[in-house]
Amino acid sequence: MEITAGLRERKKAETRLAVHEAALRLTVEHGLEHVTVEAIADAANISRRTFSNYFASKEDALLYGDEQRIRLLVERIRARPAGESAWRALHEAARDVYCQMGGPDRQWVIRARLAKRHPSLLARQLANHTNLERELAQVIAERDGGSGPRPQVMAAAFLVAMRIATHLWTDEHETRPLDEIMDDVLDEMARPFDDRPFDAGRPARQDA
């Protein structure tokens, strides 16, 4: 029974990935406004009904990779040592996810650029981040053992910092590594939440 259930879950994951990749490919080729759910389903060799079993919309299919990264991020935050400050745990977890995924792949780049160009996709991405924000606030509250607005403020600030880092990275045409930009933005955002920047021990950069 366990083997059968494992095979079933792997098949579902493979189908989700196939739909996601088909959605990305068609959107790059034709533009989001010209891509339909039916076209994505055909490209992934599934029925329209099967598509609906996995995703609510084409926007959800396009953002599937972001959803996977979000789940991994929450897992990494929960696994951080209990003695770490909440902000440092968020920052370290983000770096853990970056290292595990080997840096951003081309699909990450495509999703980031598409979200900036298409309001419907950006709206869906922000909705996903709203759900993540609630989860992060809960993890922060559990770690800090406190209450009040601090967990919500910190979770929102962290997600804004990550979004700014991604936008800066794409605006700079990927000339700097994303993790370097991410560190800079998170260090800047850290000031209200941490006693010192994340990499306070590294030598200060020399301005040109």
Image (cartoon, rainbow, N blue to C red):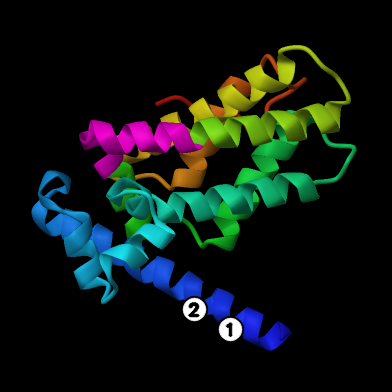
Amino acid type indicated by mark 1: Leu
Q: Residue at x 60, y 51 (%)?
A: 71
**Residue density around tag 2, few if under 14, some if 14–19, many if 20 or more, within 10 Å:** few
Q: Residue at x 39, y 55 (%)?
A: 55
SS assignment at label 1? helix
SS assignment at label 2? helix
Can you say whether 154 is above or below 73 in the image? above
C-beta proximity under 8 Å, tags 1 and 2: yes
Q: Residue at x 53, y 61 (%)?
A: 101
Q: Which residue is mark 1?
A: 7
Q: Residue at x 26, y 59 (%)?
A: 23
Specify the quadrant that holds the C terminus.
top left
Q: Quadrant of residue 194?
A: top right
Q: Is residue 174 visible?
A: no
Q: Position of residue 80 (x, y in %)?
A: 79, 46
Q: How many marks?
A: 2
Q: Position of residue 43 (x, y in %)?
A: 21, 71
Q: Quadrant of residue 17?
A: bottom left
Specify the quadrant that holds the N terminus.
bottom right
- Magenta stretch: helix, strand or loop mostly: helix
Q: Position of residue 186 (x, y in %)?
A: 58, 30
Which range of residues does the magenta coloring cover? Answer: 114-128
Q: Is residue 106 visible?
A: yes
Amino acid type indicated by mark 2: Lys
Can you say whether 160 is above or below 31 in the image? above
Mark carried by residue 11:
2
Viewer-proximal residue, 162 or 120? 120
Viewer-proximal residue, 112 or 63? 63
Q: Is residue 67 left or right of residue 99?
A: left
Can you say whether 183 is above or below 39 in the image? above
Q: What's the CA distance linking mark 1 and mark 2? A: 6 Å
